[in-house]
Amino acid sequence: MVAQTTTIEAVTVIRPLKVTALLCLIISLGLMITALATNNWLRTGSYHTGLFNECTDAGPDSLIKPITGSPLPGHCQKTKDYAYIKAVMSLLIISCIIIFFASISTILGLKSNDQHRKYLYHKVATGLTFLTVICDILSLIIFPACFYNIMSMLQIRHWELDYSYAIAWGAFSFAFTALLLKICDKEHEEVYYKEKTVYNPPELS
């Protein structure tokens, strides 16, 4: 008589929304680091400034200093000690730290085989991503609003928000997309059980 054995296999399904959210978080982190590291948040003529340094480009326009105390042509110096710049800088650095841990938590959630831990990791990642979005949007609003208030002190009326500010908006957009993906992915049960029956031939005596 043929012996019959029934086994149940657990199959774990990784949902594409979570993987896409992780990619968005990683891209957002890279863009935010780029925005912090570059010195092109504001520009007027040959003068441009970031959150850490302000610079004057070498060229014909650099012969006229746009603002008092700006660096010599072809040189950079530490950004002026404005409170709003410190606030924006702090918010974005905190945002980078939070989004790093949100990415780690998402990776741990994807790799974990324990359903309780997996659910916990993804909830933590969602909360951290929400905090990142708040920090980003606050900094992106504070920067131009506060600069507008001190613009009259600099005796220059024509200013442009430069590409570093645009990159920061890109970082916010990816973080916000990651948050939406995490909120929309309400499928908590990712384990499916498959029953398999194996027929073993009888042993010959």
Image: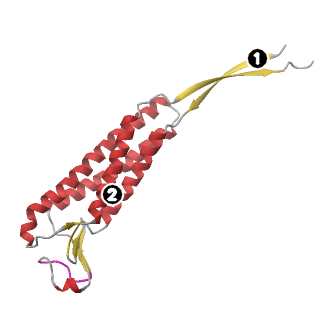
Name the element at disc 2.
helix
The residue positioned 36% from the left and 36% from the top of the image is 183
| Residue closest to the far right | 205
Residue position for label 2: 32
Q: Position of residue 148 (x, y in %)?
A: 11, 62
Query: Earlier along the polypeptide chain: callout 2 or callout 1?
Result: 1
The residue positioned 62% from the left and 24% from the top of the image is 194
The residue positioned 20% from the left and 67% from the top of the image is 160
Q: Which mark is residue 39?
A: none
Near mark 2 (Cα within 10 A), the count class, few <14, some 14-19 or many ≥20, is many
Determine which quarter of the picture holds residue 40. Answer: bottom left
Q: Position of residue 43 (x, y in %)?
A: 21, 71
Determine which quarter of the picture holds residue 125. Answer: top left
Q: Is residue 198 above or below residue 137?
A: above
- Choose between 9 and 157: the one closer to the eye: 157
Camera sees residue 123: no
Q: Is residue 60 above or below residue 24?
A: below
Residue position for label 1: 4
Q: Going by the image, does 194 lie left or right of 131?
A: right
Quarter of the picture containing the N terminus is top right
Name the element at disc 1.
strand
- Main SS of the magenta segment? loop
| Residue range (magenta) | 68-74
Estimate the spatial distance between the alpha carbons at disc 2 and disc 1, rounded to whole Å: 59 Å
Camera sees residue 183: yes
Q: Amino acid at mark 2?
A: Met
Q: Position of residue 177 (x, y in %)?
A: 36, 45
Q: Going by the image, does 33 lie left or right of 158?
A: right
Q: Amino acid at mark 1?
A: Gln
| Residue closest to the far top | 1
- Choose between 37 and 164: the one closer to the eye: 164
